[in-house]
Image (spheres, rainbow, N blue to C red):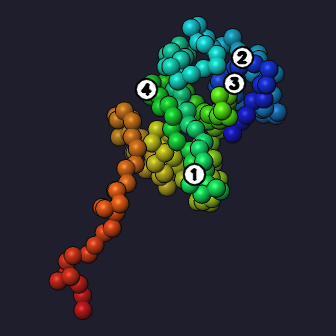
Amino acid sequence: MINVQNSSDQLCFLWAVLAALFPARKHAQRVSKYEPYRDRLNLDGINFPVTFVDIPTFECQNNLSINVYELTDGEDENASLIFPMYQTTNRKAAKTVNLLLLRDGDNAHYCWIRSLDRLLRHIRKCNVKKYLCSYCLLPCYSQKSLDAHETDCANEEGQSVQLPDEEERDLKFRNTHRMLR
């Protein structure tokens, strides 16, 4: 992740998007690395700090796809979960940018997620390389299976995994006549 340090302004959304579009080789956390590119984005009608209402306008004006995820605390004190908070509808844009929204009370801050797979692998404490769909966070074990999944996933609006409720969660084997002796 790249967290651009901008304590003096409310432009963290802009700096995070610029970090994704124009990655810096050294000192990527500095605002000065992205100031020369500030005029390359169309910011007409965008209010800062950016809310989810402003993101579709920003996407259309700049031909970008933006996904926003939020880090929340899990049930266990050591567990954290990432949930999609905003999913783009502009899936055919030139570039997709994944952002992480960090909240502290009324304050919010955007960071660029350089690699969604590496971020979730760290949180899940899993060392196996996975390819994640940026729309539904479904893990795939090869780029080929991810490409096949994304063609189907692109046709859907929003997706989420639904687990069975408490009554339906237990599976029972009922075909005892098919068992081997």
Provide residue 107's location: percent of width, then percent of height: 67, 28
Relative depth, front residue between 15 and 46: 46
Amino acid identity at mark 1: Gly
**Secondary structure beneath label 2:** helix
Q: Quadrant of the C terminus?
A: bottom left
Provide residue 177's location: percent of width, then percent of height: 17, 83
* Residue under the image location 51 percent in, 15 percent down: 57
Question: Is tag 2's residue or tag 3's residue first in the polypeptide sequence?
Answer: 3
**Could you tell me how far apart the alpha carbons at marks 3 and 1 are, in whole angstroms?**
26 Å
**Could you tell me how far apart the alpha carbons at marks 2 and 1 are, in whole angstroms?**
38 Å
| Residues tagged 2 and 1 counted as in contact (Cβ below 8 A) | no
* Residue under the image location 60 percent in, 42 percent down: 71
Residue bearing mark 1: 74
Relative depth, front residue between 21 and 162: 162
**Could you tell me how far apart the alpha carbons at marks 2 and 4 are, in whole angstroms?**
25 Å
Question: Is tag 1's residue or tag 4's residue first in the polypeptide sequence?
Answer: 1
Q: Write down the quadrant of residue 49 in the picture.
A: top right
| Residues tagged 1 and 4 counted as in contact (Cβ below 8 A) | no
Residue bearing mark 2: 37
From the image, state whether disc 3 or disc 4 is nearer to you: 3
Residue bearing mark 3: 12
Amino acid identity at mark 2: Tyr
Residue bearing mark 4: 89
Image height check: is 39 above or below 123? above
Provide residue 91's location: percent of width, then percent of height: 44, 28
* Residue under the image location 51 percent in, 34 percent down: 85
**Could you tell me how far apart the alpha carbons at marks 1 and 4 are, in whole angstroms?**
28 Å
From the image, state whether disc 3 or disc 1 is nearer to you: 1
